[in-house]
Every structure is written in structure tokens, then in C-alpha cells.
Image (tube, rainbow, N blue to C red):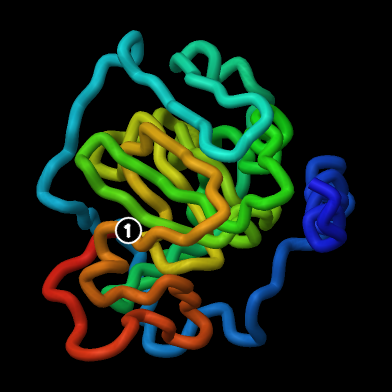
Amino acid sequence: MGNPSIIERKERFARKMAGKAKPTVRSTSRLPPGQHLTTGFPVLDLGIQPEISLDKWRLDVGGLVENPKIFTWEDFNALPQFEDVSDFHCVTTWSKFDVRWGGVAFFTLIDVVRPKPEVRYVLFGSRDNYTTNVRLEDVMDDDALIATKYDGKPLPLEHGGPARIVIPKLYGWKSAKFVQSIEFVADDKPGFWEVRGYSNIADPWTEDRFSGGAPPPSYNS
């Protein structure tokens, strides 16, 4: 974890946790191009909302890490808790401002498992067999987290509960619902929608939605 950019990001996170950092500014316009604002919170998934009792819930965090962990619900919620308000942007062109999430910051998880220097990507696996891939730098922002709460309450199943990924800087399909595994890897591996025409990067401010050709027929947010 000696990468200067990672050290800088961790220093910023420390300032944020101490209440000394200003919110991340990604664009002079808060609404990314091609998006429209909604006051609701549309529900999009693969058509499966897998229920699981909290006593059976597990989060397997591994790959190229010094300290792989399999968290129970109790273990995971014993980690330092984090709350953040951010905007959510779906590739289907809607955006929702000021979404209040609670859970475990990605920085906290990274400090626990300690990714090896060769790690460049993170792969997420979900209980509905969904997968998606992001660059390590994408989860090193101070607003990325594994969310277990939405608007101060336990994260509902329809929004990916009991735990989901939240990466505000990317389109919503990268914020995997129903998460059950996180793998730190050296080489990229496209996920469910990425192999079906979605972009690997998914930057809303450059409208980086698709890798080419016609848009896929449906979406996950």
C-alpha cells in the first residue's frame, strides 16, 4: 500500500472522518450529461432478489490480500461504521441526489485485509450471481462503502440488502447489490454486464456507458 496516490487518498479519508475535508467535487455540474433528476429511487436488478437470514449472511473478502477474511454479519457490523451522503447515477439516465448511506467504508475494509502491491482491480460477486469489476482506484475514494443502511434504516432487499456496494463516482451497475464476495486481483475480469456491452470504466461525467455497438437491453442499478 505504498502507492503515493493511495496514501494521498487515505490521508483525505482521515481528514474527512475528522470533519476537516470538503466534499468530493467531480464536476462543475452536479448532474452528469445525459441524466435527469428523480426524487424516487427506481429498483432495477436481474429479476432476482435473494433473501438471506442475517445468521447465514457471509462476506468473503480475498484474492491478493495479506489477511483474507470471511465476515459474519456480526463480524462485519463490529467494524467501524461510516455514514455518507452522495449522489447516485444510473446508466438508464436517472440520477438521485443526496442519498444517505451507512455501513463500512472501503478504506476500513482495505486496512483489515491489506491488498498486496500488485492489486489493480476489484471484483464483486453477488448472491443473485451478478458480478462486476472496478479499478482499485475506484474504491479508494472517501465516499465508497459497503452499505448496510439506507436513509438511516437497514438496507431493504429491493435496494440490495442486507449489504451492497456503493461507488458514487461510477454508474450504478458497478455498485453491486446483494454482495457476498470481494476479490482483489492483478488482472481485470469483466463482469456480468461488461461482457454484454457495458463499459469497464462507467464514468457518468464522460457518459461512458457502453463499450460499443447497441446498448444492452436491460440494466442493473
Q: Is residue 99 left or right of residue 14?
A: left
Q: Residues within 10 Å of mark 1 (few under 14, many from 20)?
A: some
Asked if residue 3 is positioned above or below residue 147 in the image, the reply reads below
What x and y, as percent, mark residue 171?
A: 42, 68
Residue occupying image coordinates x 64% and y 22%: 79
Residue 85: % across, % down: 59, 52
Q: Secondary structure at mark 1?
A: loop
Residue 143 appears in view = no
Image quarter where the C terminus lies is: bottom left
The front one of 42 and 77 is 77
The image position of residue 12, as x and y in percent, is: 83, 54
Q: Which residue carries the number 1 mark?
A: 191
Rendered view: 74 above or below 128:
above
Residue at position x 35%, y 68% in the image:
90
Q: Position of residue 81 (x, y in %)?
A: 64, 29
Query: What residue do we see at 49% from left, 34% from top?
Result: 152
Q: Is residue 221 visible?
A: yes
Mark 1: amino acid: Gly
Nearest the viewer among 9 and 24 is 9
Position of residue 189 in the picture relative to residue 21 (left or right): left
Q: Quadrant of residue 106?
A: top right
Is 91 placed left or right of 133 in the picture?
Answer: left
The residue positioned 67% from the left and 40% from the top of the image is 115
Quadrant housing residue 75: top right
| Number of marks in the rendered image | 1
